[in-house]
Every structure is written in structure tokens, then in C-alpha cells.
Amino acid sequence: MRLIAFEQGGRAALGARLGDDVVALADVVPGLPAEIPAAIAALNLPEGAAALAAKLEGAPRRPLAGLKLLPVVPRPGKIICIGLNYVEHAKEGNNPIPDYPAVFFRGHTSLAAHGEPLLRPKVSDKFDYEAELVIVIGKTAKHLTEENALSVVAGYTCMNEGSLRDYQRKGAQWTVGKNFDRTGSVGPEIVTPDEIPQGPNALRITSRVNGQTMQDSNTSDMIFSVPRILTILSEVMTLEPGDIIATGTPSGVGYPRKPPVFMKPGDTIEIELEGIGILSNTVEDEV
């Protein structure tokens, strides 16, 4: 199943994409909460995906092309990001292979939807692209193990975890360089685990800038696998429905290239994950 967030009557709504059409889930799930994190919890994903799919048969549809898409979870409770999580990416930046993940947070104002322009901020031109697999949490969880961790995953999506490299390095924490308004994008849809039989750590992951491939790797190169990430994070904090976790980017980013390659106005950036889809955004200057 493929779920999207879209604007309906000035509010965020959750829908299921069926080809070129969308079914608003509030039309087929009585009492579905309006807030998307609560709606994700009510759908009981991933176990509830099959039952939900059955309810979509014969439901009223609307064209996908006529909808304004939103980030797949417009206001997540937590946006947790993992840094330096691919072996070759750590090497390209001359960083040691970590024995514990680098963890930082983003705010929801830093996110854009699929098709929405990213903003290069006034104060920096060192705007780097980063293709990432994102985990969307479906159930409240604490103290997971690697054996049961995937049972709380509602689905997966794509992210361009855009970074302002100069601001990222202004201090010991990366937070400032990762939180300029509308500098990262997430989407276009949440893909439930049943659509990815090979699992999250066997997916080709690529990024393209104006059609040129810049990153081309596989999530098998992760230092900390998806189950391991969930186990480590849930040791520290309670994971809740609608939380999203960006799992790090592979090698091929812009800053270590000679000369460096940064996103600029007029560029089109595509992030593609095998079995999940293509996230596409243009870039424009902040006004």
C-alpha cells in the first residue's frame, strides 16, 4: 500500500494511492483521526495494511494530479536523523567508521513536499543534497530488539536531507545546518513493508542533479541497519506513530567533490529508492 498526505479543505488528509487516483482514508475508515500521526496509529500498520486494502475496493476516488501534496507526515512528533551511516560516505569525508550513530533532530518547518521547491537560504550557497531512506513509525515502542524492531514500522519513504555545509560546521552540533526552512524534502508517499519483500537493507538508493547521477549505492552499505537503528533509538526514547527517522546518506554528496557541487536555483533534484519511488524537487532562492 502507498499512502500520501494531501491538503483537503485547508487541512492535512491521509490517502491511499491507487495508480493515478487517491482514496481519502477518512471515507473508508469510520472515525479516523484527522491528525496524521494519530491516523497512522489507528490504521495499525504494518499488520492492518491488508484489511485496509480490502476497504479500498469500490471506494470513491479523486485524481492524484489535482491534489496538493504535503510532506508524508506534515507535523511529525519527532524527526530523527542519523549521520555518517554509510561506510563509503564516512570514508569520502575522511571520517572514522563510528561505533555508535550520530543522532540529531530536524524541525517540521525544515521540510518540503514532493514537487515543492526547496529554498536555498540567503546566508549560504553551500546547499548539499543527500539521498536517504526514511522510516515511518506506526506503533508506540520502547526497548525494541533487532528481532522485533521491524514490527513497529508503518512504512518507508524517500528524503533529500538537504544540508548547509558551512552552517553544519559552525559548532560541534549539526542542528543549525540541517534546519533552515524548507531545505529538506520527504515523500512522495509512505510505502508499507509488504511492498518491499527484500527488506529495507537491500535497496538501491540514488540521487540525480539535473539528470546526472551523483549518488548510486545500496542500503546494504549502512553501518547501522534499520533494525539496529530502531533498537538503539528505542533504548533512549519512546518512538511514537508518525515519527520519522532519516537513516543517513551514501557516498557521492557534493561537498567532497573537486570542485564541490552544491544545489542552486533552477536545479532539479531527484532521490530514488528501489521499490519506494522518486522524490523530486526544484531549487529556488529564499526571498
Image (tube, rainbow, N blue to C red):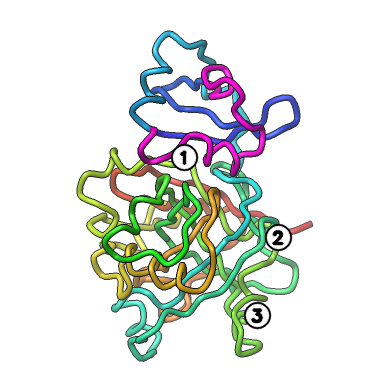
The extreme right residue here reads 287
Mark 2 Cα within 10 Å, few/some/many (few <14, many 20+)? some
Element marked by disc 2: loop
Quadrant of the rendered structure where residue 226 is?
bottom left
Q: State how far apart marks 3 and 1 are (Cα).
A: 30 Å
Which range is magenta?
24-48
Query: Mark 3 — residue?
Result: 167
Residue 9 in the magenta stretch? The answer is no
Q: State how far apart marks 3 and 2 are (Cα).
A: 13 Å
Q: Amino acid at mark 3?
A: Tyr
Residue 189, labelled with which disc?
1
Image spot of residue 236 (x, y percent): 51, 74
Query: Compared with residue 144, is residue 69 higher up or lower down, i.e. above or below?
Result: above
Q: Is residue 277 left or right of residue 37?
A: left
What residue lies at 45% left-to-right and 42% top-to-bottom? 190
What residue lies at 56% left-to-right and 41% top-to-bottom? 115
Query: Compared with residue 251, is residue 72 higher up or lower down, i.e. above or below?
Result: above
Element marked by disc 1: strand
Quadrant of the rendered structure where residue 169 is?
bottom right
Query: Mark 2 — residue?
Result: 181
What residue lies at 75% left-to-right and 30% top-to-bottom? 10
Q: Amino acid at mark 2?
A: Asp
The extreme top residue here reads 58
Q: Nearer the viewer, residue 91 or 85?
A: 85
What residue lies at 53% left-to-right and 36% top-to-bottom? 42
Image spot of residue 154 (x, y percent): 42, 45
Q: Confirm or deny contact between disc 3 and disc 2 (CB under 8 A).
A: no
Viewport quadrant of the N terminus? top left
Residue 177, labelled with which disc?
none
Q: Amino acid at mark 1?
A: Glu
N-terminal-most mark, 3 or 1 = 3
